[in-house]
Image (cartoon, rainbow, N blue to C red):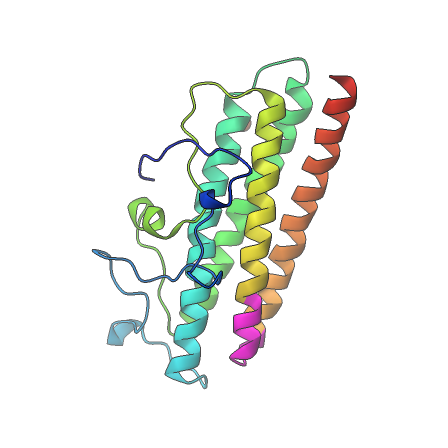
């Protein structure tokens, strides 16, 4: 991932979207186009090229965001401190694993409709809308807060991409994204409740 400034939660500017509020597009200067694919990778599909491109463009930024969110959640898993260490250390690990496991099915979904995806972490860095977090130290309550905002953001991105898939008759992709939307909302729910508990205790 490229070096970026640390995320400052709560600012919409942290989360890049298209000018009209739609998800960021997957075209990125200096990296391979994710659609159309080279002939050897152009898996046949009954979707039109326009439909397959729309879905590929909508899903690839989510894949990049999943890489970014995985790295951030693991970062907090590793660099956590304080009396709630054990609970949060385990929760962040579980959430990171869930995010990581969403990546392969999303990429392979795109391959099934003749799209391609991210080639490297630097490619992901060009497409991600969740910013990396390079702060030297983040307190546990702030970690929970930042992850809550990022998970809420990725849920919003997934919901928008599922709508694009629906609009383009790609119901298999929208079904897959529905599962990941539910997962993102579950992560947000847990983080929200933990944030409340910390406020009561603190
Ligand atoms: Fe670990």
User: Which quarter of the rendering shows the N terminus?
Assistant: top left
* Spot occupied by residue 33 in the image (x, y as percentages of width and height): 27, 65
Q: Quadrant of residue 160?
A: bottom right
Above or below for 150 versus 47:
above
- State the residue in front, 11 or 148: 11
| Residue in the picture at 45% in, 56% down | 17
Q: Quadrant of residue 131?
A: top left
Q: Tell me the chief SS of the magenta region.
A: helix
Expressed as whole percent of the image width and height from the top left, the position of residue 101 reads: 53, 49
Residue sitting at x 53%, y 77%: 170
Query: If the picture is divided into quarters, which one holds ligand 1?
Result: top right
117 sits left or right of 74 in the view: left
Q: Is residue 202 above or below residue 6?
A: above
**Vertical order, 171 against 16 (above or below):** below
> Is 8 placed left or right of 36 in the picture?
right
Magenta region includes residue 193: no
Residue in the image at 25% along x and 76% along y: 39
Left or right of residue 50, residue 82 in this image: right
Residue 169 is one of the magenta-drawn residues: yes
Q: Quadrant of the C terminus?
A: top right
The quarter holding residue 158 reads: bottom right
Left or right of residue 22: residue 185:
right
């Amino acid at each position: 991932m490229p070096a970026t400034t640390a995320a400052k939660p709560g600012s919409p500017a942290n989360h890049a979207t298209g000018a009209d509020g739609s998800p960021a597009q997957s075209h990125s200067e200096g990296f391979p186009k994710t659609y159309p694919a080279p002939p050897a990778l152009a898996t046949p599909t009954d979707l039109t090229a326009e439909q397959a491109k729309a879905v590929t463009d909508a899903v690839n930024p989510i894949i990049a965001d999943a890489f970014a969110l995985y790295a951030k959640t693991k970062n907090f898993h590793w660099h956590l401190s304080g009396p709630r260490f054990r609970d949060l250390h385990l929760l962040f690990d579980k959430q990171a694993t869930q995010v990581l496991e969403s990546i392969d099915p999303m990429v392979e979904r795109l391959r099934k409709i003749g799209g391609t995806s991210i080639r490297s972490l630097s490619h992901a860095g060009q497409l991600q809308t969740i910013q990396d977090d390079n702060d030297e130290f983040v307190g546990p309550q702030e970690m929970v807060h930042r992850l809550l905002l990022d998970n809420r953001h990725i849920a919003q991105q997934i919901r928008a991409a599922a709508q694009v898939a629906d609009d383009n008759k790609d119901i298999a992709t929208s079904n897959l994204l529905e599962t990941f939307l539910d997962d993102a909302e579950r992560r947000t729910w847990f983080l929200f409740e933990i944030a409340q508990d910390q406020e009561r205790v603190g």
